[in-house]
Image (spheres, helix red, strand yellow):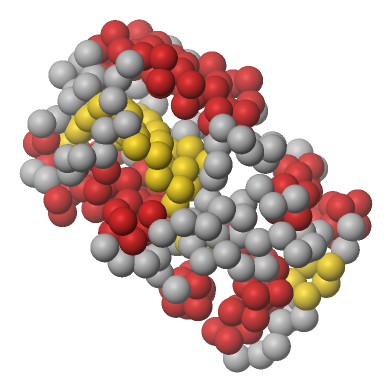
C-alpha cells in the first residue's frame, strides 16, 4: 500500500509525515511538494519525494500515479485560487487511479457560514463526485492560531477579542495530525466524516487557561469588530491580514466553530490534549 501526502513541508503536513514514518516503512510513503529541494531531509529518510504543483495539474497526475491512499491538505490563498487548486488535485487523483482520498476540511463544512467554508464545501463535493472512497477530516481550530495572542499576553497585553460569547473547539495541530495519520493508514475509514473538535471554550475560558499556565490573571477586552481591526493594525498585523482576522472573530461570535464531537476519541483512543497542556507546549 502506497500513501501520499500533499503539502508535506507545511506545519500540519510535516507533523503528519513524522507520525506516518513511525507507522509505516518509509518506502510506502510518498509526498507531493511544489519544491522538492525543501524536502531533502525527508528524501534522506527514504520518503519518495515527488514534484507536484496545484497550479499545474499534469504534475499532480504524475505525482499521484501508483498511489493507493492520498491525503490532500487544503492549500493556502484566496477562495477562488484554493477551489481551483483543490479541483486540480481531485481530478488528478481520479485520473491517476487513487483508491482513497482523505481531505482536511473545516468544522460543519456543508452547512457552515464561516468565511473559510466555501472552499471546503466545494472540495468535499468535488471528491464525492469522483465516486472514490473518502474521509473528510473537518478540523475545528488550531491552538497554534492563538500563539501571537498568547505571546502578547505574556508581554502584558490583554486578551483582545470581538468574538463575544462564541465558543471554539481548539486542539493542537499534533492531535489533528495523529487523527489524519490514523485515517490514512488504517482500514474502516471509507466514506466517513470526522468532526475533529476539542472541548468548546469561550474567549474568557481560553484566556483563563493561558493565565493558569503563565501564573497571572489575563484580562479579556471585548470590543467590536471595527476596534478589533484597529487594534490588530496597531499591533503591526499586515493590512491584507486584518480583514481575515476580523472575519474569524465574527464567525466565532456567530457560532460557526461551536461543534461538539468525540471524534478525536474515536480515532485516537483518547481525548485531544487538554488545552492547558497544549498552551504549555506552545509556550515551551
Tell how many labels: 0
Classify residue 251 as left or right of residue 172: right
The location of residue 76, given as percent across then percent down, is 55, 34
The location of residue 228, given as percent across then percent down, is 84, 57
Classify residue 182 as left or right of residue 91: left
Residue under the point 26% across and 63% down: 269
Visible in this render: residue 178?
no
Query: Toward the viewer: 185 or 194?
Result: 194
The location of residue 61, given as percent across then percent down, is 30, 12
The location of residue 111, given as percent across then percent down, is 61, 35
Residue under the point 41% across and 20% down: 128
Visible in this render: residue 39?
yes
Residue under the point 45% across and 73% down: 274
The vertical placement of 260 against 209, above or below, is above
Query: Toward the viewer: 127 or 89?
Result: 127
**Image quarter of residue 231:** bottom right
The vertical placement of 181 against 260, above or below, is above
Q: Quadrant of the C terminus?
A: bottom left
Residue under the point 32% across and 46% down: 180
Q: Quadrant of the N terminus?
A: top left
Query: Toward the viewer: 255 or 178?
Result: 255
The vertical placement of 212 against 261, above or below, is below
**Image quarter of residue 121:** top right
Query: Toward the viewer: 109 or 58?
Result: 109
The vertical placement of 182 against 215, above or below, is above
Classify residue 63 as left or right of residue 284: left
Amino acid at each position: 500500500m502506497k500513501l501520499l501526502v500533499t503539502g508535506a513541508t507545511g506545519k500540519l503536513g510535516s507533523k503528519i509525515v513524522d507520525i506516518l514514518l513511525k507507522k509505516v516503512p518509509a518506502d510506502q510513503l510518498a509526498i507531493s511538494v511544489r519544491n522538492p529541494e525543501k524536502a531533502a531531509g525527508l528524501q534522506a529518510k527514504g520518503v519518495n519525494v515527488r514534484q507536484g504543483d496545484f497550479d499545474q495539474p499534469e504534475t499532480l497526475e504524475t505525482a499521484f500515479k501508483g498511489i493507493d491512499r492520498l491525503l490532500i491538505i487544503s492549500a493556502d490563498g484566496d477562495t477562488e485560487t484554493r477551489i481551483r487548486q483543490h479541483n486540480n488535485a481531485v481530478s488528478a487523483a481520479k485520473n491517476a487511479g487513487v483508491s482513497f482520498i482523505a481531505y482536511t476540511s473545516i468544522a460543519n463544512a456543508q452547512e457552515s457560514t464561516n468565511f473559510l467554508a466555501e472552499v471546503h464545501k466545494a472540495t468535499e463535493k468535488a471528491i464525492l463526485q469522483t465516486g472514490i472512497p473518502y474521509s473528510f477530516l473537518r478540523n475545528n481550530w488550531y491552538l497554534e492560531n492563538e500563539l501571537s495572542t498568547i505571546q502578547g499576553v505574556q508581554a502584558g497585553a490583554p486578551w483582545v477579542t470581538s468574538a463575544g460569547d462564541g465558543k471554539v473547539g481548539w486542539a493542537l495541530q499534533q492531535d489533528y495530525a495523529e487523527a489524519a495519520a490514523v485515517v490514512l493508514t488504517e482500514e474502516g475509514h471509507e466514506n466517513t466524516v470526522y468532526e475533529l473538535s476539542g472541548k468548546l471554550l469561550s474567549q474568557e475560558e481560553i484566556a483563563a487557561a493561558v493565565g493558569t499556565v503563565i501564573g497571572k490573571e489575563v484580562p479579556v477586552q471585548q470590543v467590536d469588530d471595527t476596534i478589533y481591526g484597529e487594534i490588530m493594525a496597531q499591533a503591526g498585523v499586515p493590512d491584507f491580514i486584518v480583514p481575515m482576522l476580523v472575519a474569524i472573530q465574527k464567525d466565532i461570535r456567530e457560532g460557526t466553530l461551536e461543534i461538539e464531537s468525540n471524534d478525536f476519541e474515536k480515532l485516537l483512543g483518547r481525548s485531544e490534549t487538554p488545552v492547558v497542556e497544549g498552551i504549555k507546549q506552545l509556550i515551551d
